[in-house]
Amino acid sequence: MHGPAGPGAPLRPRKKRSSPIQGEALATYAPAGPSTSPAGTRVRLRSSLGSEPLELKLKLAFAERQILKRAKMSLFGTTSGFGTGGTSMFGSTTTDNHNPMKDIEVTSSPDDSIGCLSFSPPTLPGNFLIAGSWANDVRCWEVQDSGQTIPKAQQMHTGPVLDVCWSDDGSKVFTASCDKTAKMWDLNSNQAIQIAQHDAPVKTIHWIKAPNYSCVMTGSWDKTLKFWDTRSSNPMMVLQLPERCYCADMIYPMAVVATAERGLIVYQLENQPSEFRRIESPLKHQHRCVAIFKDKQNKPTGFALGSIEGRVAIHYINPPNPAKDNFTFKCHRSNGTNTSAPQDIYAVNGIAFHPVHGTLATVGSDGRFSFWDKDARTKLKTSEQLDQPISACCFNHNGNIFAYASSYDWSKGHEFYNPQKKNYIFLRNAAEELKPRNKK
């Protein structure tokens, strides 16, 4: 989870460049570089750790959560189901400030903040959704075409679950936890075994399916990136990171890892994993999330990087014109634009690219999701504001379903944590909304 908010120092003014763009422009996009704000704008970071180490906040938050939730421990255990299926249909749910977009509510959501979501790969018939939470559990639902969600199974860690991913054939789920381990969950047998060990919490996990090898990649706050054969208790390879791993993404043959102190490293995975390039961060503040995007030939060609300062950087690995092709844009901010109305700035908690259109979704601590067309540099849609932050998001394999989690992300500190407030996962039929803007 994420850090408590703290007021940030006013950002240095700078001149904004403009560019002819179609439709509703990305309100304040700029060429990639250290992030700043327009002259005369007062800003305050609403989701920032400042200089406070992320893992320290997590330890304190976890200890407090354990005390607050003892009376409402999950009764699900490791049974094959955890509740009754919902009957919601797309567009037929009721709405209030916890669901202003009238989206499908996933039944039997976790008892504590939801940190990660992942849909099953196209090799698996149907759609299955995995969620990891601060209740130390990982849950699986079947999402039917009607929109009905059916709880299928769950597994436990002994610490919060920070990341999840699927094997390419959809038979297994891999989970990363604050308990310093990663597990492999066989969905057919509903058995989970430990496959990885670190000296600190495991922040990221990805399954790599290469022509000549298969492995699990884990990134940790122990400043290592490890690669695991699931049949062995020892890593195949260990790569040292310059700092703690904060977020990562992988689309073969490329991986990108963002670390503390704004570190950014690209890896190539062909033959065997190796460091490809270290990149000077285009963002000035702490990295929060990263997602790789593909070109028209379906090959990974760059990534989007989000920070706690309500900003996303679009970065191509080998752009024809770096000064023009790489840029940043602001998002998840309030509308204050002058000295009398300070602008609140929120963390970007998640980024996901549409698997068909190549457009992207961002979710933030402001309780909104937004859809963007990076090629047209245009905002496609912004949601109504939920009554708590949106902590994670993902698309299903064909992009017809957009899932997002509504949970407190601790961006305003422990005093705003309400243990009685529910956590939600919503499903939205957003395929039309993610279509790129027509070029004139």
Image (spheres, rainbow, N blue to C red):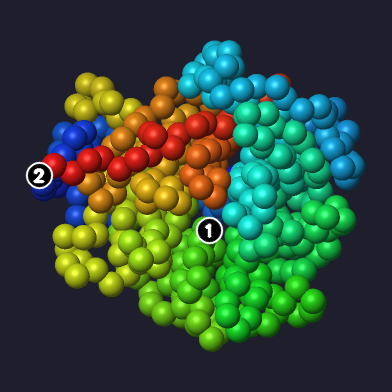
Q: Mark 1 points at which residue?
A: 246
Q: Which of 105 and 266 is in front in this view?
A: 105
Kindly identify the residue that appears in the image at 52 percent across and 58 percent down.
247
Q: Can residue 128 be seen in this view?
A: yes
Q: Can residue 201 be seen in this view?
A: no
Kindly identify the residue that appears in the image at 85 percent across and 53 percent down.
190
Vertical position of residue 253 compared to residue 408: above or below: below
Vertical position of residue 128 compared to residue 85: above or below: below
Kindly identify the residue that appears in the image at 36 percent across and 66 percent down.
297
Q: Mark 2 points at which residue?
A: 20
Residue type at mark 1 is: Tyr
Q: Quadrant of residue 145?
A: top right
Residue type at mark 2 is: Pro
The N terminus lies in which quarter of the figure?
Answer: top right
The C terminus lies in which quarter of the figure?
Answer: top left
Disc 2 packing (10 Å; few <14; some 14–19; many ≥20) = few
Vertical position of residue 364 compared to residue 89: above or below: below
Q: Where is residue 18 in the image (x, y as percent from the top left)?
A: 10, 45
Q: Position of residue 188 (x, y in %)?
A: 83, 55
Q: Nearer the viewer, residue 282 or 165?
A: 165
Mark 2 element type: loop
Q: Where is residue 240 in the image (x, y as percent from the top left)?
A: 55, 78
